[in-house]
């Protein structure tokens, strides 16, 4: 018999009902043996939880406040023993309290990736799963440059979609966050107000890209008025939601190179952020502001020093959190050496999606435990949390690792073990550890354009002979595939159908086939990429997130 109930004191609380429903569904799916679980609440001040009671029942999951119930249920499930014989209830007992207040994820909803295209039922169910790992904030971005204004039908559809996702988050105790670029504009922004791009990307490199030429110069007469009025309108479209944070972002697109704005990060951006912060306070007075320093000193020099000087001399009242990160292997050296300017609390923005692989998610799961652990080891002690950058579901394990870091600094290796036991069955743990380690060692890859006579002979007419796959290493791929097939044979039946397993299994097969074919396309690879496309709902996927299947390569690389 499976029984999940709430105490009299906890009944009627929406998050208790949500946690009870999730737990009952999972216990049923995993064919739990006789178990009784009681959910209870204390009048505490953190999202911690306690698990107590005899394995024979009742087992108590007691949250310090409602937001702790979903993480408590998650811990209970991850530490239960699950095999083909069913689920034996967790014997883990104790208390667990989060160490970082901001345990976020950022969903990129663009390029027709999973978050942009998948049925909302799938996306919203996935949001629920993140709550089980202790996620308490979900960030999304209404990317203005795609639209001509809020009346644009495509803009209305995106607003509806983002509302649905953020509502689903609210229902499981996850607050919302909105991202806005400091000087972004709509696609039809007035030509006379547009930012200066005469020197290329943000004025500091000869290579164009990373902006859309519809951003606004805040130093031109009317420029700041355009920015604040369009931002006010956009924020009002989300004011009915529980928006805990709003971000103000400097780059990728964004910035202005004119003499009155440069260097952007220490000049025009600060003036723009101050004006936008005022609008945020007006429309969403309870929201807190996160200022991003993404790509400071990437295109020019002096941004970090100039920003730090300004923020330390006259800290803006709204400057509470600083999201100080950059793509690559290191947290920004300035903050590691000097701390956060203006007394702000530091957050990170780990890049878990695009790192050393193209197209993003194109090969299935991309587990990066050692890489993410190294980032945490360098900066984690200085952080109040963060928001991993997510392009899709293929980096699900990476999200879990980051959320484990934010919760209590849990080592990535331990999260890998909990993840394997939770989703693939308790008997899979050691093999999955080896599989994940091998995949990370073989991680770096891309599509290469090169003359390949052998590919020209084997590929069908019209297929680009110059497109192949470049992998840093495929050593051991065949052995990993054999291990994956062995693990799958002993998994609980429902685990084999879990999309997380399909992402790992397909990655194992793709690596082995790339090794066998020496990087050339084959029927096996094409079929695997097509299955990934179905999982991602990638029928309209843009170039960076499309799958490297034959039809994608023909579209982008032919000729």
Image (cartoon, rainbow, N blue to C red):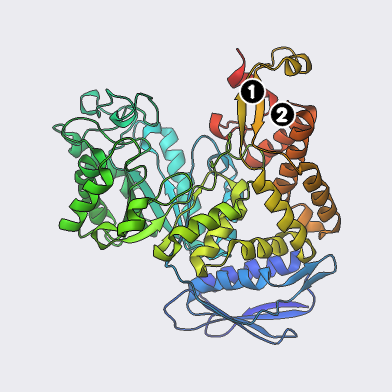
Left or right of residue 33, residue 404 in this image: left
Q: Position of residue 485 (x, y in %)?
A: 83, 49
**Residue at x 23%, y 59% (from the top left corner):** 342
Left or right of residue 550, residue 400 in this image: left
Question: Are the residues tagged 1 and 2 within 8 Å (C-beta)?
Answer: no
Which residue matches tag 2?
Answer: 519
**Element at label 1:** helix
Left or right of residue 123, residue 307 in this image: left
**Element at label 2:** loop
Residue nearest the viewer, comparing 133 with 354: 354
Q: Is residue 441 above or below residue 102?
A: above
Which residue matches tag 1?
Answer: 553
Q: CA distance from mark 1 to mark 2?
A: 14 Å
Residue nearest the viewer, comparing 440 with 484: 440
Q: Is residue 394 above or below residue 316?
A: above
Q: Position of residue 491 (x, y in %)?
A: 81, 59
* Image quarter of the N terminus: bottom right
**Residue at x 53%, y 48% (from the top left corner):** 352
**Residue at x 20%, y 60% (from the top left corner):** 317
Q: Is residue 399 above or below residue 524?
A: below
* Image quarter of the C terminus: top right
């Amino acid at each position: 018999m499976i029984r999940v109930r709430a105490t009299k004191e906890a009944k009627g609380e929406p998050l208790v009902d949500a946690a009870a429903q999730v737990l009952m569904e999972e216990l049923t799916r995993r064919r739990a043996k006789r178990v009784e679980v009681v959910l209870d609440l204390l009048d505490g001040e953190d999202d911690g939880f306690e698990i107590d009671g005899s394995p024979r029942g009742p087992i108590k999951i007691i949250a310090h406040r409602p937001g702790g119930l979903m993480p408590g249920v998650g811990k209970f499930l991850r530490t239960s023993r699950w095999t083909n014989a069913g689920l034996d209830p967790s014997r883990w007992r104790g208390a667990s309290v989060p160490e970082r207040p901001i345990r976020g994820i950022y969903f990129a909803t663009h390029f027709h990736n999973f978050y942009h295209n998948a049925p909302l039922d799938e996306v919203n169910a996935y949001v629920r799963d993140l709550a089980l790992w202790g996620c308490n904030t979900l960030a999304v971005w209404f990317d203005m440059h795609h639209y001509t204004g809020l009346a644009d039908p495509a803009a209305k559809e995106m607003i509806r979609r983002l509302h649905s996702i953020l509502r689903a988050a609210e229902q499981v105790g996850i607050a919302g966050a909105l991202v806005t670029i400091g000087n972004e504009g709509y696609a039809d922004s007035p030509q006379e107000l547009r930012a200066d791009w005469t020197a290329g990307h943000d004025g500091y490199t000869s290579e164009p890209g990373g902006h859309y030429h519809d951003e606004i110069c805040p130093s031109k007469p009317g420029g700041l008025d355009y920015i604040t009025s369009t931002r006010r309108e956009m924020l009002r479209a989300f004011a009915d939601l529980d928006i805990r944070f709003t971000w103000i972002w400097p780059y990728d697109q964004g910035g202005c190179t004119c003499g009155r704005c440069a260097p952007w990060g220490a000049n025009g951006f600060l003036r723009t952020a101050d004006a936008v912060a005022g609008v945020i306070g007006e429309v969403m007075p309870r929201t807190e502001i996160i200022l991003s320093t993404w790509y400071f000193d990437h295109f020019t020099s002096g941004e970090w020093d100039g920003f730090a000087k300004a923020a330390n001399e006259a800290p803006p009242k709204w400057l509470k959190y600083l999201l100080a990160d950059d793509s690559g292997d290191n947290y920004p050296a300035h903050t590691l050496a000097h701390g956060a300017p203006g007394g702000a609390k530091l957050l990170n923005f780990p890049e878990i999606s695009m790192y050393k692989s193209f197209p993003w998610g194109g090969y299935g799961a991309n587990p990066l435990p050692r890489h993410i652990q190294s980032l945490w080891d360098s900066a984690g002690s200085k952080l109040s949390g963060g928001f991993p950058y997510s392009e899709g579901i293929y980096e699900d394990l990476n999200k879990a690792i980051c959320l484990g870091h934010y919760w209590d600094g849990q080592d990535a290796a331990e999260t890998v073990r909990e993840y394997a036991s939770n989703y693939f069955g308790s008997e899979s743990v050691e093999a999955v550890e080896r599989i994940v380690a091998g995949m990370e060692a073989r991680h770096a890859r891309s599509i290469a354009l090169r003359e390949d006579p052998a590919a020209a002979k084997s590929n069908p007419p019209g297929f680009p002979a110059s497109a192949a796959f470049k992998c840093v290493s495929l050593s051991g791929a065949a052995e990993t595939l054999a291990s994956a097939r062995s693990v799958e044979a002993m998994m609980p039946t429902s685990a084999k159908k879990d999309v997380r397993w399909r992402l790992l299994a397909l990655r194992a097969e793709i690596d082995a086939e790339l090794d066998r074919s020496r990087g050339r396309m084959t029927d096996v690879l094409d079929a695997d990429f097509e299955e990934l496309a179905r999982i991602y709902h990638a029928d309209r996927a843009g170039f960076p997130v499309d799958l490297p299947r034959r039809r994608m390569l023909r579209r982008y690389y032919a000729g």
